[in-house]
Amino acid sequence: MSSFWCNGEWLAAREFPAAPLDRGSLLGLGLFETLLGMDGRAVFCERHLARLAAGCAQWGWPPPQQQFADLPAVMAQLLQRAGLASGPARLRLTVTAGTGALADLASGADRLVWLSAAPLAEAPASLALDIAPWPRNEHGALVGLKCAAYAENLLALDRARRGGFDESLFFNTAGELCEAATSNVFIVRNGAVATPPLASGCLAGITRGVLLELAARDGMDCAEVALRRAELNLADEVFVTSATRGPVAVARVGERWLGPPRLGPRLRDLWEAQVRRSILV
């Protein structure tokens, strides 16, 4: 079974182009999206494609949809071919820079647009968060982009897991809460839900955006708020969100244990219902 699609062709892993001179391979110059596959469909696909197109526009690249208009259908076919048409799966859509001069950001004619699919493990009941020892730069050139240059996040995750944690939490250079290495973060205090604003340097996560909409529709007190260490330390609940896991409760931040979540499970129920609705459209 093929589990890769690249530039319009179905490939087995051994057939995937190495492309050693592609600036995506050489320099990490590429953009990507990780999507949840559910029962043979890509969840919130249009939102992911819109974010990817915005990132491409920022770099002056044509969006992959311009070259391949049928990407949602390709994702559905990929899940079928990979034997992942039932239940959850992980989809990744990547756009590389292709070959080109080192100082030229232009997209090469040989760039790769590729998709992969893989099984997805069940989300954990809760997570433990480490605090990254270095800040996220909220003024950096890559803010808001799902960039293939992922080393900083991987270093933070490796440090966290060596210390017995599952995820790593970043503050920005202003000392404000930003995001986790692979997820957005929310806190709950006195029944109010808050998440850092995009100005903090965090990614505009798809699940983050969906939850903000769902919480407002449900009548919850939920807002984007600049948060500092003191607010995190006083939080009654903390949870993180990602495309493949949805909202997941945090049991521990550093050495501080949190009590049982109350609003987090409600938001997870709302998210799961929205996922089900999205694949029926």
Image (tube, rainbow, N blue to C red):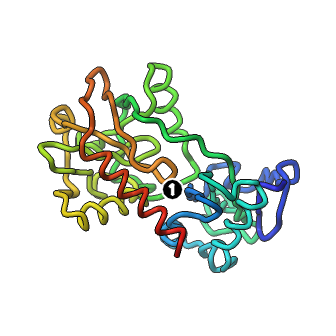
Q: Amino acid at mark 1?
A: Lys
Residue 59 seen anywhere in this rendered image of the structure? no
Q: In the current view of this chain or complex, which residue is farthest to the left? A: 190
Where does the image place residue 91, in percent across and percent down from the top left?
A: 63, 56
Q: Secondary structure at mark 1?
A: loop
The quadrant in which the N terminus is found is bottom right
Q: Position of residue 264 (x, y in %)?
A: 30, 45
- Read off the residue under disc 1: 146
- Quarter of the image for residue 197 reads bottom left
Report if residue 244 is visible in the image. Answer: yes
Q: Is residue 66 above or below residue 271?
A: below
Residue depicted at 36% across the width and 52% down the height: 202
Viewer-side residue, 256 vs 123: 123
Please state the horizontal and vertical placement of residue 183, each as a whole percent of the image: 42, 46
Circle 1 packing at 10 Å, graded few (<14), some (14-19), many (20+), is many
Task: Give me the residue at 47% from left, 36% from top.
Answer: 124
In the rendered image, the vertical position of residue 244 relative to residue 112, given as above or below: above
Circle count:
1
In percent of width and height, residue 58 lies at 48, 69
State which quadrant residue 235 falls in. Answer: top left
Which residue occupies 30% across, 66% down? Answer: 213
In the visual, does 77 lie left or right of 142?
A: right
Which sits in the foreground, 156 or 161?
161
Q: Answer above or below: position of 227 versus 230.
A: below
The residue at the far right in this view is 15
